[in-house]
Image (cartoon, grey):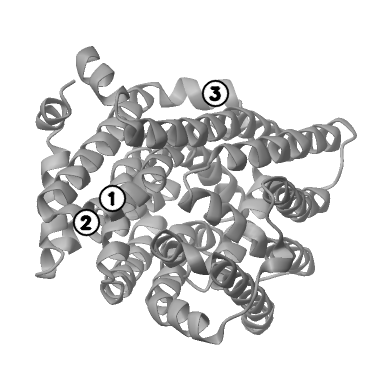
Amino acid sequence: MLNKIKELKKHSGFMKYFKNTSWLFGEKMLRMVIGLFIEVWVARYLGPEQFGLFSYAGSFVAIFTIIATMGIDGILVRELVKDEKSTNELLGTAFWIHIVGAILVFIVLTMVIYFVPSHDYNTNVLIYIMTSATIFHSFSVIDTYFRAKVSSKYIMYASTATILIISSVKILLIIYKAPLIYFAWVIVFQSIVLACSLLYFYYKNNFSVMDWSFDIGKAKQLLRDGWPLILSGVVTAIYMNTDRIMIKELIDIESVGQYAAASKISAAWYFIPMIISSSLFPAIIKSKQQGEQLYYNRLQKLYDLVVLIAFFIALPITFLSGWIIDLLYGNAYAGASDVLVIHIWTGIFIALWVVASKWFTIENYLQNVMVRTLMGAILNIILNFILIPRYGVVGAAWGTLLSYIFINYLSMFFFKKTRVCFYQQSKALNIFMSIKRLGL
């Protein structure tokens, strides 16, 4: 294996993507360690009930804020790689699409809140505060640009500065015993700090947002290719957050806190397949141009790698869940242990989808994403209605895991064109063969 690595290091292309992945991985590891520590401290400080309310509001907002991206982020990476001469037009157009999307979020959210009688005044205030952060997410197009150009060290610099500042603010809020609403405002402040950091590094590289321009033709192209993604994104957000919303409606807000505590630990590891796939995305796009065999060989190894990582994370946490919850959250969150045992295995099927989503984007087969995601969301809601009343938060964990298995893996078999994904994913789920293919 060492000989293989030495041989690969001789190739400048490999080193370029390896370094890019290392920057992204380092940034996310730092974010995970610091972020998880601070989030655990916040959860301990707020207690299951207030932490549950905070998590519920965040889940409610997440369903609608996906609208702000208009589904174009993955498409933007593809276009930036393919058409370098139109960089300023693409970035400017994507920025204004994000702005319009953020305005739509407020309009849609206001309409929805009006028809949800179970919300009290404090819940609605939290939701509106968190939603206001979406306007600053428009500057994430700079993040997308650095990813497309394989310059992720600047993303790491910006994210590291942001997390250090925000973590310090949260610590001060805990020390001075601030009320819950202050933690909602921190989410807005975090978006502002990250936007400013990205702008700083963008200007430091001798670029300027003043060079950006809006192009109606490119807007139509991005939206035409991205509309299936925005619809599937909304549906994805529904089935990724509906469990907390339904727990609140079917049980109570404290149970939301228990569930959120466990899912925080599970989700902490999702960045690994995302980082690896995002960093190698430009290389996979280029391999498509060099031949189908190379293209699918790279995809298979990517499947193998992310599933292998997810498996070896889930296995020990399954047996140590009780100890982990007690160590991090304390006895008040004891109910989160049983949830974690189940929920941690969602990481494998998240990893499968992260890689498959790249294939869907490259193949421009995005309409299918919407259909599959809608099927998964409906299944998740049905499972939650059946399982939560019977098994409580553990039922919600099973509902989430089963729906992920269906939407991210089994549903691939139902469509002729996506069966290639199903077969590659099935190979990756054979852990021993994955190890062999990777030469480990």
Q: Are marks 1 and 2 in contact (CB under 8 Å)?
A: yes
What residue does disc 1 label? 284
| Neighbours of disc 2 within 10 Å: few (<14), some (14-19), many (20+) | some
Element under label 2?
Answer: helix
What residue does disc 3 label? 326
| Neighbours of disc 3 within 10 Å: few (<14), some (14-19), many (20+) | some
- Residue 128: quadrant of the picture: bottom right
- Residue 107: quadrant of the picture: bottom right
Separation (CA) of disc 3 from disc 1: 42 Å
Element under label 3?
Answer: helix
Find residue 121 and report its horizontal and vertical position in percent.
79, 69
Q: Nearer the viewer, residue 265 or 107?
A: 107
User: Taking the image as drawn, is residue 403 in sight?
Assistant: no
Find residue 427 and report its horizontal and vertical position in percent.
11, 42
* Residue at 23 percent of width and 21 percent of height: 7
User: Taking the image as drawn, is residue 343 in sight?
Assistant: yes
